Image (tube, helix red, strand yellow):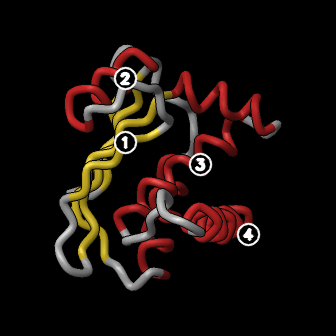
Amino acid sequence: MNKISWEALNVEMPSFDVALVEQWIEQVARNHDRVLGPLTYIFCNDDKILEVNREFLQHDYYTDIITFDYSKSRMVSGDMFISLDTVESNSRLVGCEYQRELMRVIIHGLLHLCGINDKGPGEREIMEAHEDEALALLDS
């Protein structure tokens, strides 16, 4: 049974090498001393991510990813909603390719499941360093 599921809600499934990305996700998890449990990536639009944000987090704003963490001990597991609309607008905002930003967001969710946070003082820089390290693996 495949531990990683990919779904699309009201959007077209983004195009990428699924096998390569799944190997990459598993490698990043291993690098953080974690093993993969069930992961579900749900690609959606801004309307859906706003709905999820309001319903489950009581936040009234758009975001690129919302991660629901079901991890236990070293096993990472969760559902990750990714707004392709926000990924696209963020890629333009930061001046990078859409595909690169999509990979950054995909691994961002996994890094949250590995215990890396990005809301407290100094945590954003730590998260970005881990994202950059993971993206470098994808490039190699």
Residue 39, located in which quarter of the rendered image?
bottom left
Instruction: Indicate which label's residue lies in the foreground, 1 or 4.
Output: 1
Disc 2 crowd, CA 10 A, few/some/many (<14, 14-19, 20+): some
First in residue order: circle 1 vs circle 3: 1
Looking at the rendered structure, the kind of residue marked 1 is: Ile
The residue labelled by disc 1 is 66
**Marks 1 and 3, how far apart in space?**
15 Å
**Marks 4 and 3, how far apart in space?**
14 Å
Residue at coordinates 24% horizontally, 74% vertically from top-left?
A: 75
Disc 1 crowd, CA 10 A, few/some/many (<14, 14-19, 20+): many
Task: Check disc 3 and report its element: helix, strand or loop.
Answer: helix
The residue labelled by disc 4 is 140
First in residue order: circle 1 vs circle 4: 1
| Residue 119 screen position, x and y as percent | 47, 57
| Residue 91 screen position, x and y as percent | 71, 34
First in residue order: circle 4 vs circle 3: 3
- State left or right for residue 3 relative to residue 45: left
Looking at the rendered structure, the kind of residue marked 4 is: Ser
- State left or right for residue 45 relative to residue 67: right
Residue 2, located in which quarter of the rendered image?
bottom left
